[in-house]
Amino acid sequence: MRIGNGYDVHRFAASGTLRLGGVEIADAPQLEGHSDGDTLIHAIIDALLGAAGEGDIGEHFPPGDPSTAGIDSRELLTRAVRLVAARGYRVVNVDATVIAERPRLRPHIAAMREALARGLGVEASAVNIKATTNEGLGEIGAGEAIAALAVALLDEGGE
Ligand code: MG
């Protein structure tokens, strides 16, 4: 068994549609970033890579790489899971916390679990997502950004 943790934060752009946990959320703008800015998926990818001893997301998907500009982060997740499998590991479970003042995430959690479970190759019951606010403190508390933390557990049994 191997455990890894991940953290990411992205600020809101002025326009677009929010992508978080692989789900489109219409009542908030997109997050800035080289990809689609999906901070939750990025935190999970870092947790997976960390558990596999494979460095971090910036190493595998460099922000200057034109081939991943604007890419759907679900595709990055698929690639990370493939890499972890190639190292001989499979995902046991993922637990994540999203820290956001806006939008309200509760109605979207079930869809995020489904989307992430598909990407991770596990049942939705193996993906837990918690949502909290930053109690109005700092930039996240002012609703300018969304942060995410994730922990992933891997076990032997990949490819
Ligand atoms: Mg990121």
Image (tube, helix red, strand yellow):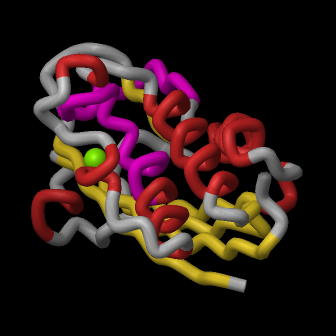
Magenta segment, which residues?
A: 23-43
* Label total for image: 0
Majority secondary structure in the magenta region: loop
Whole-percent x, y for residue 108 in the image: 63, 38
**Left or right: where does residue 36 sit relative to residue 96?**
left
Whole-percent x, y for residue 71 in the image: 37, 21
The stretch drawn in magenta includes residue 110: no
- Image vertical order of residue 83 relative to residue 134, above or below: above
- Image vertical order of residue 107 relative to residue 136, above or below: above
Q: Residue at x 20, y 30 (%)?
A: 34
Tell which of 49 and 30 is nearer to you. Answer: 49
Tell which of 89 and 40 is nearer to you. Answer: 89
The stretch drawn in magenta includes residue 39: yes
Q: Residue at x 12, y 58 (%)?
A: 139
Q: Is residue 132 visible?
A: no
- Image vertical order of residue 15 relative to residue 102, above or below: above
Q: Residue at x 76, y 37 (%)?
A: 118
Q: Residue furthest top?
A: 16
Whole-percent x, y for residue 129 in the image: 63, 60
| Rendered image quadrant of residue 102 | top left
Whole-percent x, y for residue 22 in the image: 56, 33
**Left or right: where does residue 19 sit relative to residue 3?**
left
Q: Is residue 78 visible?
A: yes
